[in-house]
Amino acid sequence: MPPRSELYSSVESFGQPRQSRAVIELFETFIPYIALNVVMLMAVQRGHALVALALTGLAAAFLVRVFIIFHDCCHGSFFPSRHANRIVGYAAGLLTLTPFDKWQRSHAEHHATAGDLDRRGVGDVWTLTTREYQAATAPKRLFYRVFRNPFVMFGIGPAILFVFGNRVFGAGATRRERFSVHFTNAGLVTVLLVAHWTIGLPTLMLIQLPTLFLAGAVGVWLFYVQHQFEDVYWARRGAWEPMRAALEGSSYYKLPKVLQWFTGSIGLHHIHHVQPRIPSYNLQSCQDAVPAFQAVPPLTLRRSLDSLRLRLVDETDRRMVSWVAVNGDGGNVRSNEIRR
């Protein structure tokens, strides 16, 4: 691993947002997404609901890309202008039902604490260690098992998060965070009222809900697989190293080119955690130019599916393990099964 200062120096030039490229990214993303919604609306109004549903997957793919732009704006990395980042971020937040300032804060905490076992709980996926699971009460174990079920995590979970969780703010929220929640909620109510007076709420729901739920499931999957793989880096606060957390605690999710484009190269997550100020459209160039990033083992699409079986962090072996690694009778870790 190169010295921290050397790695920061090597990525410095890639952390400069480009106005012209950002505008192209906007046109390539927002215009097709809006056009698809118009086509889906026309199809439903002409009695061809199945045609609209057939376009849901493509619309969801573009909505994922809208969220990546939102994500970049939250880091202030999409445009050179801070003001432009906030305007576009708020607009993208309306489309993805995500309050800009609220999400910006929780995501910043995620970057500051990723891989730190003593600072879990904000902007991450709920993850217990094997010891914590052993010491948990039966109801907590059951709730944790239900939460970690793929159907709940990637099905019900995204729906609850984007439709309900993003509608409220927690205690201690700043004035900006509260405003962003109120602004997004007001925008959502406005859309519902306009739809009620024009196309009708059932039509809106038929077009938007499947797209939102599918895009949400993909988004949660991407976030999950970026920090939940077998040999992911975890450490207690005293031993936690930010650079190791970035390079070893964030996956290099190597996707086919078309999927990489739709996901805004966010699979190059090891680079993003080293320097969040690098725009998504500069990540691949950075990967190609810096040997330290090329040395990170890639996580392929096929191998990433194995992460679905991982549930707990084993601090002794420093890896994530499955339910198979825990006895059903008392929760004792089977060391021989952990290493499978």
Image: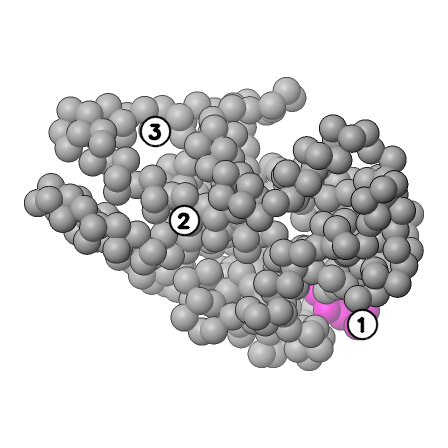
- Please tell me in which quadrant of the rendered image residue 291 appears: bottom right
- Depth check: 190 or 222 in front? 222
Q: Which tag, 3 or 2, sits closer to the chain's start?
A: 3
Q: How far is disc 3 from disc 1 in space, using C-alphas?
A: 47 Å
Vertical arrangement, residue 39 with respect to residue 256, above or below: above
Q: Which mark is residue 188?
A: 3
Q: Nearer the viewer, mark 3 or mark 2?
A: 2
| Callout 2: SS | helix
Q: How far is disc 1 from disc 2 in space, using C-alphas?
A: 38 Å
Residue drawn at x 41%, y 36% is: 97
Identify residue for label 2: 214
Identify residue for label 1: 1
Decide: marks 3, 1 in contact (CB < 8 A)?
Answer: no
Image coordinates of residue 206 in percent, x first then y, are 26, 39
Q: How far is disc 3 from disc 2 in space, using C-alphas?
A: 19 Å
Residue drawn at x 50%, y 65% is: 265
